[in-house]
Amino acid sequence: MTNDPGTTAPEERLSPLDAVHRAAGASFTDFAGWQMPVRYSSDLAEHHAVRSTSGIFDLSHMGEIVLIGPQAAAALDFALAGKLSAIEIGQAKYSLLLAEDGGIIDDLVVYRTGEDRYMVVANASNAAVVADELRARAAGFDTVVSDESDDVALIALQGPDARAVLLETPGFGVDGPGNDEEDFDAQIAALKYYRAFPATFEGQPVLVARTGYTGEDGFELYVAPERAARLWGALVETGGPRVVPCGLASRDTLRLEAGMPLYGHELSRDILPVQAGLGRVVALAKEGDFIGRAAVEQGPVADAPVLVGLAAEGRRAPRADYEVFDGDGADAARVGVVTSGALSPTLGHPVAMAFVSPALAEAGTALFVDVRGTRIPAAVVALPFYKRAS
Amino acid sequence: MTDLNALHYTEEHEWIAIDGDVATIGITDYAAEKLGDVVYVDLPAAGTTITEGTVVGEIESTKSVGELFAPVNGEVVEANQAVVDTPELVNSDPFGEGWLIKVSTSSLPKLLTRDEYTALTGE
């Protein structure tokens, strides 16, 4: 058996919810220098809970970078691939931080939290780089960039029961005068996907967003670290069996089924957005320059690999870095590489994402993945693998 | 209930139960927990000659793949079909119904005692 359990380095960072996870019996993994729950009991049970009831995730390792100032919107239009000046207060947008050569430095969710105020949420592994890049890129604009990652905890409640549990949980209100639970309920009822509003929990601020990374309806709650354990506890207590604590292992299989890219797997400095199917995220129509525009307008070379979904039969899953071939014979050519893969808990068969030659990217194309010496057949399929019914 | 102190262990997180010249081999609860939910098990067929230290099977979870190393030289006399059909037995009963293979062997290499093994895992 080789399955290096790893060791805890003394410099590893702990979530503000660390004690809660330990009390719940979580197993931990290193993720971008953080000790985060990989699972509490069963990856599969946690995965199924999010698809059938709901799951609660600690995402406090993610980075939050705030821009405040009259030119915050203009700075983001220059710094990022999207047109962030166009989103309304309370709206969120998925965006990309590109290098000059068009490569992806990180993928982000940007919330407009005020007329002159935005919060940029970055992957944990890239949070410092994103903060540095945003500071440098915003230097000529009238805006202040501050990395508030240490002052923000993030709890995600995801799944078909997430909304009901949030409504039932006592202690929520809205930010402002006349604050009470009825106002909170009305705000939740009106909250559309990729929107957020400033709420309170036990009188303290919490940003409630209808966003997520699981393919289910759900919410992400940004809260001060010292309030996180109270909020987590209230949601778990209210939800009872409808709220299952979930680790990063189930988060990965959930996002994979939903066809969502993970930085370091589907996205990297060597990948242009269009290769990963994210051409729509780049607002080439926006006026003014932005970093990466020239490279994106020129586009990748004609035979640059593109991201596809692969579906296989049986139970052996293609996994990251496994090679993709156009046949199973000795003369077969290597035509791509897997970026993520797993036996899909929801679908019951292996699914994977892979970069392959553009000529082989059409749905239905029959390919093969070398799974530790055995070529298993895998068909190109449209993403996502899983889409919720409603 | 298996007496864990009566088993032998390897640094690859396998356990070995000796009964005459037959060694029953599985992975430890520690290894099963680190792997997560096991969804696929590939084992050598009965009759296969195995060589100590070589990879003879795979234990795959949703999250990762673990290799089964032969802890002894010998010939596989039985592979556990129940665990191939129901891989979660590796998680639910790693020292019992989750056993993997039985190997006929004439000599044993140096193996770890329970105390030596738990010292290794720190649990």
Image (tube, coloured by chain):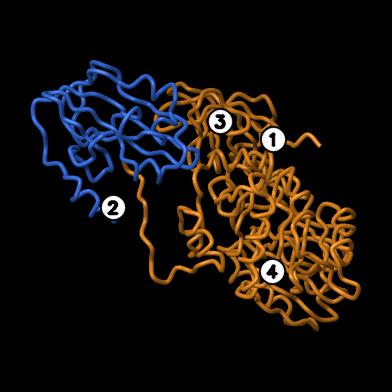
Discs 4 and 1 carry the same chain letter? yes
- In this view, the residue in front, B19 or A306, is B19
**Where in the figure is residue A332, as x and y percent of width and height?**
49, 26
Residue annotated with mark 3: A350
Please name which of the two marks, 4 or 3, marks the residue nearer to the observer.
Answer: 4
Disc 2 marks a residue whose amino acid type is Thr
Local SS, label 2: helix
**Callout 4: helix, strand or loop?**
strand
Residue B67: image tag: none
Q: How far apart are marks 4 and 2 (CA)?
A: 37 Å
| Horizontal arrangement in the rendering, residue B47 relative to residue A286 (left or right) | left
Which badge, 3 or 1, comes first in the chain's sequence? 3
Q: In this view, does B43 lie above or below B47?
A: below
| Residue for badge 2 | B121
Chain identity of mark 4? A
**Rounded to the nearest whole Å, what is the CA distance between mark 3 and mark 2?**
32 Å
